[in-house]
Image (cartoon, grey):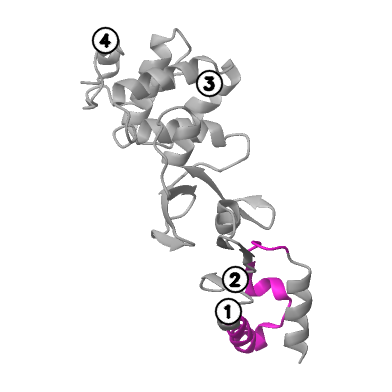
Amino acid sequence: MVIATQIKERLASTDYGIVLTINDFGIDSRYKAALVKSLNRKVVSGELQKLSKGKYYKPKKTLFGFIGPSSFEILKDLLEKNGKIVGYITGTSAFASMGLTTQISSAIMIGMNRYRRTTTRGGLKISFLLQPNTITKENIPLLRILDAIKLIRQIPATLPDESVVILSNIISSLPQKQIQLLCQLSEQYTPYVRALLGAILEYNNQSTCGLKMTLNGVTTYNLPISESVLPNKRNWNIL
């Protein structure tokens, strides 16, 4: 009865579409099995919908069917934990907001500090990009720039040359303090990312912040970028 009461009270105070985990019900872990059984009964009755293992939400019924949780609700435990940022949205959806592609994808990519396998939630395919830098609210836009450089061959419906032009415009608008942080963050990325970043900065007559010193002088990088877009690319061993 205690479990049933706590579930009832929690659901009464929770809006439609808000994702709840079993930890949100404030029930002792000893009774976890009983809690899960009670929640699953509510799924069968239609009072709750199951998003994924251990995650539930109250569906809102409309004339057009049930409305599920927002993308943020589906992903929130992957982006924040105990008030701390642990992940950020990157990949196609982020690149679209940067003007790098017009393609809309139902797949989501999340940058995190640890490896996770691709998963599916609420119809969303979620993949993960390992991010070795500490993730903060302030540096997420810079991490997305570096991710776009790293994934420049994979940005949908946009040629690498087109991406370089757009990224060059974005980077050229950054203040020097942000440029310095961008270079610092790039040191945790693969060398070709630093080489391409350095070439873009040099082309824009911006400080390259010693990026060339972080690269092996005899290593070359085969990137599908033309000299018409980046005439100085060979200065950075980009072929």
Q: Position of residue 191 (x, y in %)?
A: 33, 31
Q: Earlier in the sequence, mark 4 or mark 3?
A: 3
Kind of residue at badge 3: Ile
The residue sitting at the front extreme is: 63
Disc 3 target residue? 179
**Would you say residue 40 sits in the magenta stretch?**
yes
Residue 72, above or below 200 = below
Q: Earlier in the sequence, mark 3 or mark 2?
A: 2
Q: Residue at the spot x=32%, y=32% of the render?
A: 157
Say whether disc 4 or disc 2 marks the residue closer to the N-terminus: 2
- Marks 2 & 1, CB-CB < 8 Å contact: yes
* Residue farthest toward the top in the current orientation of the protein: 205
Label 2, on which residue? 56
Camera-near label (1 vs 4) is: 1
**Mark closer to the chain start, 1 or 4:** 1
Asked if one can make out residue 187 in the rendered structure from this viewpoint, the answer is no
Q: Position of residue 142 (x, y in %)?
A: 52, 31
Q: Earlier in the sequence, mark 2 or mark 1?
A: 1
Tag 4: amino acid: Ser
Closer to the camera in the image, 44 or 225: 44
Residue beneath label 4, please?
228
For the residues labelled 4 and 3, say whether their Cβ atoms are less than 8 Å apart.
no
Report x, y in % for residue 81.
63, 57
Residue at 68% x, 63% y is 16
Instruction: Determine the CA span between mark 1 and mark 4.
Output: 59 Å
Which amino acid is tagged 2?
Tyr
Q: What's the CA distance linking mark 4 and mark 3?
A: 24 Å
Q: Is residue 194 above or below residue 5?
A: above
Task: Find numbered disc 4 in the image and state the secondary structure of the residue it sits on.
Answer: loop
Instruction: Give the residues in magenta.
Output: 15-42
Q: CA distance from mark 1 to mark 3?
A: 50 Å
